[in-house]
């Protein structure tokens, strides 16, 4: 009998990684390797008056904007091109790249760095969302410092408010979060056979190629990006490697030797992009029975000094602002605000964790005000198949939240515990519901990405999958071949799926947005089916497949209306806590989850994602405080930026619900971000229950709990 | 280039200390981090460094009739695993960092850092620990409270090496050590509290109360403790509210990247209250 | 520069180095032992874990000058041993490996634990791994990997 696709197999990369055989970027050997170090402007907003550099010994270089090749642009081609390779004249955030020191001896580079002096004319700074909106430091972007300014309307919010007997208003905030991929950022660049080659720890090799092509003023064909095994990314290696690759490419153009740029941890914590902080201001109208008749939400995110992907993060945040609930009349105003803070960027969930946290807490607060249990209140509004989404699209999914909730309740004996613990008793249970639109927002796949994938059967019967999605820990180098093996009915050992090299693989798109397994995995399935049919055609068979957009999934990017996502993953998370009365420290006593990921391609890999995602989210919700003061991240060592250890949380219960999605391989949906989306709000909800008072922000630290408890 | 020394004997180490003003490095868990530089470059030590972890003269834990001597080279793991060491100190050590670090770090190093957040220090204050400082001229002993005078400031001559920590052997009826860290393991202290008391026949024979990370040094007041010693439990219940303000005044923490002054102060006092209450409950 | 002699993976070697140089840099750069990773350089993450005289240490905190006369074991020296194979297989079978960057350090911490405690409880495993940060797995499957190695490794530990 054929094995179920979900039955777990040993990951193909596990043995070499556990044995320390796998080489990461900083483990690779290069002849005559040079070291590069970014020289940064240590002001948040200033005009550079002069840069004085010492006389450089032979073999040492200080690469600056003057070294950009003729015709090359001092701008990095991302979604926007506002982020320069090197500061143009005005520094817009603390740590912006001024130049790169390169040479063979690292101590000498440090000495040279000390000898560089930059003279600044200080300018007014704006760090918070409000300071950005008030143009405190002038116009950083456009006329109003809003990279994006969107409105969503569902139903008739005016009419809804007219029916309201009470209006409940509140503000809820989320903080920064640092990725803490265990392998810091790192790239190596060199020049070979007329081509610029960059080896990168990254999520999106083709993004880097596109980003640096205008800088070098060369055709993208002259740039090769080779993916290095990536030691974790979580969104932090989606766009940020572009920011390092651009000055590195300029240095390679000048020096023509292999140059390594590997951040150390302190540099990585201090000078890489973080998750966007967010603020939600809710005005919700309730009728006499406490039903929601209208909701008006103002969502702002702190995008920092350059646009990067902030507008798309904002879109996901506002599309998530009703969580899993069907609210009849809604208006959402969303803005991504330019400030002199370090540019915020992609992080697992991409705006959804912020939107969902705001939404879940607001719903819990309404329920608590009404004296109703948050779970009972939230269930009234569960989205169902055929309901209208916040972008006036149609929910195509069968929504199985009730079934999932039942499973979580049973696993955690939640009912009994809720009956036993009274609010304010020091013990509490919090439950969150969440969804994650799988794949790119809106029309990204069909209009921008247009994924292509190639499969080759070689003469010896071995099969090669050629695509651009990377293994960064999530298991793609196992799950892609597993899909192919299941279709082709050959052993997985006969199928390879190596780290991509842009000169060899077609562009199947970036490794982002929980799209890889679902969208690209579907291409693997389709290509495998075609290959199976044509298996005996020749010794060598090549199959090329293109993305096909699911039918009945319409989207208008100009108005942000329609089906924002083809399908959704769904989750329920319950957290039990005990709050120490003397110290306000929180002991997490239990974690129970249920997820609908369509069909698991490999159960062990899925459970690994669930476990990692939930713990990372609990870090976000409880421990990971990241203050931004005078333009600097205050917690810039791993002693001060606190991520969970093996001892911080109990082992968890993780259950899966099968709910196949026809456009995913074997029914699979995206899940890498979904599993991050509910931990923080479940934790905060549990603490609220335990202390009998409301919390309005994350992380819910003991300091914050103490403050809340002291509140009248 | 940092000058480093690898003395073969304690005497040689003392000579190097005197002549070269080299800083003794035992475990290196603080110094290697504090002066770390870029990968592939050497730590940026501002002075010569002398390795002393291998010196057999200081690598011991010696149980004597009246005191326990912990040699400056004894690692935190060795202290943690030595059953004769007071439980309260072993508890504090077991909550420091993680096993790998405890295999390198030393109690003497923790003291010489003289950080008010040093995890062993609040306990050693309460235990009336003394330190032995040795130079070519001989050894002297002073109490840990005299040794540390401020953050990073200590009474260590530039020809001296701390060679041992001495802990009097005493018994207590009520001991509490509580570290409030940034997380459950591998954490630095936001604050710590240590309470030791000997209660006999409903009377306080001895009591020591110390607070870590809430001032420039660990906070302990022998004066205030004197007000408590000799009280019956009944009296303690009555008078505690008059004595507590002493601690309200003494506990003066700051805001930093790890916590807030408000939190540190309130939690320190909560733990004090909790400890005092435990004395009254069990008697 | 001085010559520092020590035992590395059961072989006597000596290196020419400045005494303050981190053991981590000597292992990775001079000796090419790249199973030892640098995750933080400040003793917080455990990716650079090695055994020094049989005890788990962070090689980023160890000046090479303190290694003279000691025995150092890295994953390169252990991965083909019974201990190494047992734990690596158990990790692979338990889903303990994701991005893999923390994994060599986790393997070293697990070996250090199982050598002194062949049948650890979950809480003991958690303590044993508490100096090794992982951002991918949430730890459950690593803990299960250590349990599996404990079960399978009867006689090895």
Image (tube, rainbow, N blue to C red):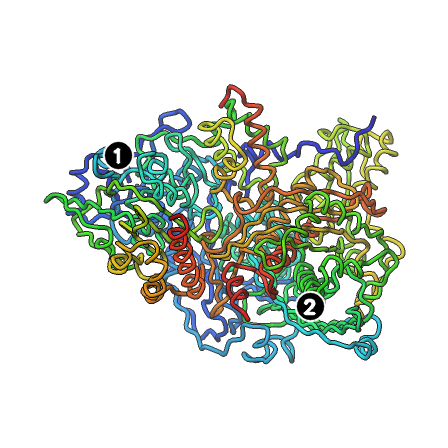
Residue A369 circle label: 2
Residue B227 image-quadrant placement: bottom left
- Relative to residue B223, is residue A180 drawn left or right? right
Q: Quadrant of residue B171?
A: top left
- Nearest the eye: C63 or A548: C63
Instruction: Name the residue beneath numbered marker 1.
Output: B60
Give x and y (percent) for residue A196.
59, 51
The residue depicted at 64 percent of the width and 44 percent of the height is A611
Position of residue B99 in the picture relative to residue A555 (left or right):
left
Which element is circle 1 on? loop
Q: Are marks 1 and 2 on the same chain?
A: no
Q: Pick the quarter of the image with the C terminus of chain A.
A: bottom right
Name the residue: 33% across, 56% down: B116
In percent of the image, x 63 and y 64: which residue is there?
Answer: A308
- Residue farthest to the left, as pictured: B137
- Residue placed furthest toward the top: C155
Q: Quadrant of the N terminus of chain A?
A: top right
């Amino acid at each position: 009998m054929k094995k179920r696709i979900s039955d777990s197999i040993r990951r193909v990369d596990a043995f070499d990684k556990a044995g320390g055989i796998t080489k990461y970027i900083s483990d690779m050997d290069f002849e005559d390797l040079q070291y590069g170090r970014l020289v940064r402007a240590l002001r948040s907003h200033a005009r550079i008056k002069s840069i004085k550099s010492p006389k450089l010994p032979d073999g040492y270089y200080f690469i600056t904007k003057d070294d950009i090749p003729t015709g090359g642009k001092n701008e990095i081609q991302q979604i926007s091109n506002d982020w320069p390779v090197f500061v143009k004249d005005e520094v817009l955030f603390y740590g912006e790249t001024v130049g790169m020191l390169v040479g063979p001896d690292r101590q000498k580079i440090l000495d040279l760095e000390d000898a560089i002096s930059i003279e600044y004319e200080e300018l007014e700074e704006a760090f918070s969302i409000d300071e950005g909106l008030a143009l405190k430091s002038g116009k950083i972007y456009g006329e109003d410092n809003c990279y994006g300014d969107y409105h969503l309307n569902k139903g008739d919010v005016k009419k809804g408010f007219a029916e309201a007997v009470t209006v409940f208003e509140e503000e809820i905030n989320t903080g920064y979060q640092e990725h803490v991929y265990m392998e810091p950022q790192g790239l190596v660049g060199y020049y070979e056979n007329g081509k610029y080659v960059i080896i990168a720890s990254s999520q999106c090799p083709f993004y880097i190629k596109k980003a640096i092509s205008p800088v070098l003023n060369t055709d993208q064909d002259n740039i090769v990006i080779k993916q290095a095994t990536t030691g974790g990314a979580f969104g932090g290696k989606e766009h940020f490697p572009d920011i390092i690759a651009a000055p590195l490419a300029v240095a390679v153009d000048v020096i023509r030797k292999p140059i390594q740029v590997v951040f150390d941890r302190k540099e990585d914590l201090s000078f890489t992009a973080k998750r966007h902080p967010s603020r939600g201001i809710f005005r919700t109208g309730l009728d006499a029975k406490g039903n929601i008749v209208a909701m008006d939400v103002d969502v702002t995110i702190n995008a920092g000094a350059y646009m990067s992907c902030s507008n798309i993060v904002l879109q996901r945040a506002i599309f998530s602002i009703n969580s899993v609930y069907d609210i009849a009349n809604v208006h959402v105003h969303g803005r991504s605000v330019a400030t002199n803070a370090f540019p915020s960027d992609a992080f697992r969930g991409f705006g959804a964790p912020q939107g969902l946290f705001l939404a879940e807490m607001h719903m819990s607060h309404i329920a608590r005000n009404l004296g109703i249990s948050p779970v009972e209140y939230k269930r009234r509004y569960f989205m169902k198949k055929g309901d209208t989404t916040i972008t006036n699209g149609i929910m195509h999914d069968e929504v199985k939240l009730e079934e999932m909730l039942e499973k979580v309740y049973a696993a955690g004996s939640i009912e009994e515990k809720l009956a036993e613990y009274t609010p304010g008793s020091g013990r509490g249970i919090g439950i969150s519901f969440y969804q994650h639109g799988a794949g790119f927002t809106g029309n990204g796949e069909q209009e921008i990405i247009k994924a292509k994938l190639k499969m080759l059967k070689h003469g010896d019967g071995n099969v090669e999958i050629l695509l651009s999605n990377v293994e960064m820990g999530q298991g793609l180098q196992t799950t892609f071949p597993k899909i192919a093996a299941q279709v082709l009915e050959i052993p997985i050992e006969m199928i390879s799926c190596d780290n991509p090299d842009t000169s060899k693989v077609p562009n199947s798109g970036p490794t982002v947005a929980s799209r890889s397994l679902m969208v690209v995995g579907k291409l693997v399935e389709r290509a495998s089916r075609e290959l199976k049919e044509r298996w005996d055609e020749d010794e060598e068979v090549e199959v090329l497949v293109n993305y096909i957009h699911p039918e009945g999934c319409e989207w208008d990017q100009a108005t942000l209306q329609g089906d924002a996502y083809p399908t959704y993953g769904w989750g329920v998370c319950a957290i039990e806590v005990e709050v120490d009365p003397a110290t306000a420290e929180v002991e997490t006593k239990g974690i129970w989850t249920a997820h609908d990921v369509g069909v698991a391609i490999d159960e062990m890999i899925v459970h690994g994602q669930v476990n990692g995602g939930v713990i990372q989210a609990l870090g976000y919700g409880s421990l990971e405080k990241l203050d931004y003061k005078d333009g600097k991240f205050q917690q810039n060592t791993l002693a001060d930026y606190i991520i969970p250890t093996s001892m911080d949380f109990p082992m968890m219960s993780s259950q899966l619900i099968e709910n196949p999605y026809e456009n995913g391989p074997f029914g699979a949906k995206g899940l890498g971000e979904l599993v991050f989306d509910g931990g923080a709000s479940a934790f905060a909800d549990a603490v609220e229950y335990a202390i009998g008072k409301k919390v309005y922000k994350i992380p819910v630290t003991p300091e914050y709990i103490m403050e809340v408890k002291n509140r009248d | 280039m940092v000058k480093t020394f690898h003395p073969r004997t304690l005497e040689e180490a003392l000579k190097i200390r005197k002549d070269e003003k080299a800083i003794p490095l035992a475990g290196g868990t603080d110094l290697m981090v504090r002066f770390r530089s870029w990968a592939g470059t050497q730590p940026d030590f501002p002075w010569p460094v002398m390795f002393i972890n291998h010196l057999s003269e200081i690598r011991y834990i010696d149980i004597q009739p009246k005191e326990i001597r912990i040699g400056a080279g004894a690692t935190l793991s060795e202290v943690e695993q030595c059953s004769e060491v007071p439980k309260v100190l072993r508890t504090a050590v077991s909550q420091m960092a993680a096993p790998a670090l405890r295999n390198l770090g030393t109690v003497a190093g923790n003291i010489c850092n003289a950080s008010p957040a040093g995890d062993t220090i609040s306990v050693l204050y309460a235990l009336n620990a003394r330190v032995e400082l040795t130079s070519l001229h001989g050894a002297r002993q002073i109490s840990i409270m005299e040794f540390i005078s401020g953050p990073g400031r200590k009474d260590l001559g530039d020809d001296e090496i701390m060679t041992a920590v001495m802990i009097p052997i005493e018994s207590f009826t009520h001991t509490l050590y509580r570290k409030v860290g940034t997380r459950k393991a591998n954490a630095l202290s936001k604050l710590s509290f240590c309470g030791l008391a000997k209660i006999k026949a409903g009377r306080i024979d001895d009591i020591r109360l110390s607070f870590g990370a809430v001032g420039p040094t660990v906070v302990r007041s022998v004066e205030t403790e004197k007000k408590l010693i000799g009280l019956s439990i009944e009296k303690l219940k009555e008078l505690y509210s008059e004595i507590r303000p002493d601690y309200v005044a003494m506990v003066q923490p700051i805001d930093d990247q790890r916590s807030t002054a408000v939190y540190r102060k309130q939690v320190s006092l909560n733990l004090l209250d909790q400890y005092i209450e435990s004395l009254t409950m069990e008697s | 520069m001085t010559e520092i002699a020590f035992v590395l993976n059961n072989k006597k070697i000596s290196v020419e180095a400045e005494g303050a140089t981190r053991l981590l840099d000597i292992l990775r750069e001079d000796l090419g032992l790249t199973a030892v990773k640098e995750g933080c350089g400040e003793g917080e993450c455990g990716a650079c874990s090695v055994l020094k005289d049989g005890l788990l240490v962070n090689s980023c905190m160890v000046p090479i000058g303190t290694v003279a006369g000691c025995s150092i074991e890295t994953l390169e020296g252990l991965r083909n041993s019974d201990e190494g194979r047992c734990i690596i297989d158990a990790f692979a079978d338990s889903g303990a490996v994701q991005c893999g960057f923390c994994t060599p350090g986790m393997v070293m911490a697990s070996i250090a634990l199982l050598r002194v405690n062949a049948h650890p409880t979950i809480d003991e495993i958690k303590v044993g791994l508490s100096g090794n940060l992982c951002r991918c797995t949430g730890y459950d499957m690593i803990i299960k990997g250590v349990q599996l190695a404990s079960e399978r490794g009867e006689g090895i530990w």
